[in-house]
Amino acid sequence: MSSWLERQGSSHQTQLIATAIISGITVIGLVFGVQAIRRQVAVDDLKASIPNVDESHDANTVPDFGTDAIRSLLSREDERAAVLARRAQQGDYDEELIQEQLTRTASFLKPEGLSALRASFVIIIGLGGVGSHCTAALARSGVSHIRVIDFDQVTLSSLNRNAVATLADVGTPKVTCIRKRLEAVAPWVHWECFNEVWREDQGHRLLASWSEEEERKPDYVVDAIDNIDSKVALLRYCYEHGIRVISSMGAGCKSDPTRVYVGDISGSTEDPLSRTTRRRLKMLGISEGIPVAYSIEKAGPGKAALLPLPEEEFQKGGVGELSVLPDFRARILPVLGTMPAVFGYVIANFVIMELSGYPHESGGRTGRDKLYESVLQGLQAVEIKLARAEGANVQGFRIPVSKDDVGYLIEEIFRGKSAISGLPTRLALVRWRPSSDGYKADLRWEGQKMSRLQLSDLVCMTKEEAAVHERKVLADGERPEDIYEAAVVELVERRLDEERAMDRYR
């Protein structure tokens, strides 16, 4: 073996091959060495080109949810508006111009009311359709310190309901968009933008004072979040820390702007989001004391509903991955672009009234609670009277109808007016036809006496019409068809059929 190696080592051909291999390795090493040196030089040059962050050149952190939280590409017009806004926020803006722009608001709220509004600090969380319209209304009305919080970006599909976004804003953070657009309207408004998700563990920071120097706590918080977990966490945080808050319930699948009200969460009805939020808060020991904007419009046949996910998405598995973030809804909620705007302006109006001290009535679902209570008492009295006429013991006699049911029948089924004459005042509810089972109490449940009355038995009339109807139909046994015109009977039957169809949604 050793002799073979000696022969190969003395071979001229072998020596040439070895020399070529060594030369190749040397060349490769030199190439890689030069490339490494070039890379290091390029890296050093790049690092040297990055300016220090100081007053003349600032930088912003890119959040987990998208682009720069503050900046986006600005047009020349946007740049001019931004420069004017910086100057105005530093006090370099004519106060007379501000007063002129707010003159109509001042004449309504009076100077002291406008002063209080301009001195206020409001936080809006969620800049979708509701939050963007609310923010725009507050800025235009004079609120001078606004903090907006939202993790999301403007999308093409959100342009049907966003208050200020344009095609040029698609793909940019909503907080950037709202500030940029409204600075061109009210440059004196001071803004703080947080491009992030509301989290309870960050509440102390997100709902903190305006600045450490001013110690300016928020005068009001607007909850425009559509995720139930985040919504409940925010409302709980505000409730426990004594921060005034108003919450938006569901604007999706709604179409009637006349059915939107502001009231205490304990009395909100006919709203699935409100119902779920109310139940979750009750589990946390909070049953009232939070104003909400909600719609009493009922779901029903032919109306929009939450769209189901295609079956193939379930077959793929991991449906939760379709959400923008964990625990956020993945299904599509149909939204008529006008309804989030209605909710946003209703909330902004409430906040403006509260902050300016302007007298207003809120808390009643429709402002007609006293009417509903009166109608309920009258219905109870008639049912007791009918049962007593049959010889029943009416002590402890009750009817399965609540004040909410009364409001629903009057407003939703009978459109707030008598089915007989169309009059909208002095309303009452009374049975449309005599009961085939009589009026005595249902005694199937031990210890209670309850009427067999159902909502689909009742018709809305004026008190005078109800008194005549009670005497002729319920007492004397006449048929409604023999008393009323065919058109009236047809209308009533149509309304009662509507209630029967709606009953399965209750």
Image (cartoon, rainbow, N blue to C red):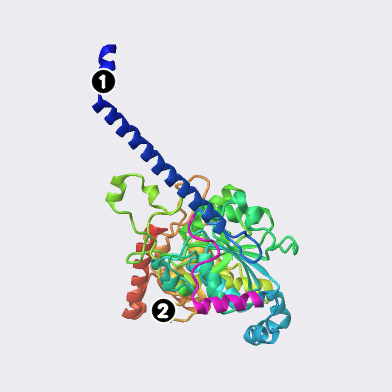
Specify whether 156 is left or right of 132. left
Relative to 392, is 236 on the left or the right? right
Is 230 in front, or is 425? 230
* Label 1 Cα neighbours within 10 Å, binned few <14 / some 14-19 / many ≥20: few
Instruction: Name the residue carrying label 2.
Output: 420
Q: Is residue 480 above or below residue 208?
A: below
Marker count (numbered): 2
Residue 6: % across, % down? 28, 16
> What amino acid does circle 1 point to?
Gln
Q: Nearer the viewer, residue 31 or 248?
A: 31
Look at the numbered disc 2 and give the secondary structure of its residue: loop
Residue tagged by mark 1? 8
The quarter of the rendered structure image containing the N terminus is top left
Which residues make up the magenta segment? Answer: 65-87
Is disc 1 placed on a helix, strand or loop? helix
Nearest the camera: 105 or 146? 146
* Residue located 66% across and 74% down the image: 89
Residue drawn at x 72%, y 78% as measured from the top left: 115
Dividing the picture into quarters, in which one does residue 302 lie? bottom left
**Crowd tier of the residue under label 2, counting other residues whose Cα lies within 10 Å: few below 14, some 14–19, many 20 or above:** some
Q: Is 95 colored magenta in this rendering?
A: no
Lateral position of residue 194 relative to residue 315, left or right:
right
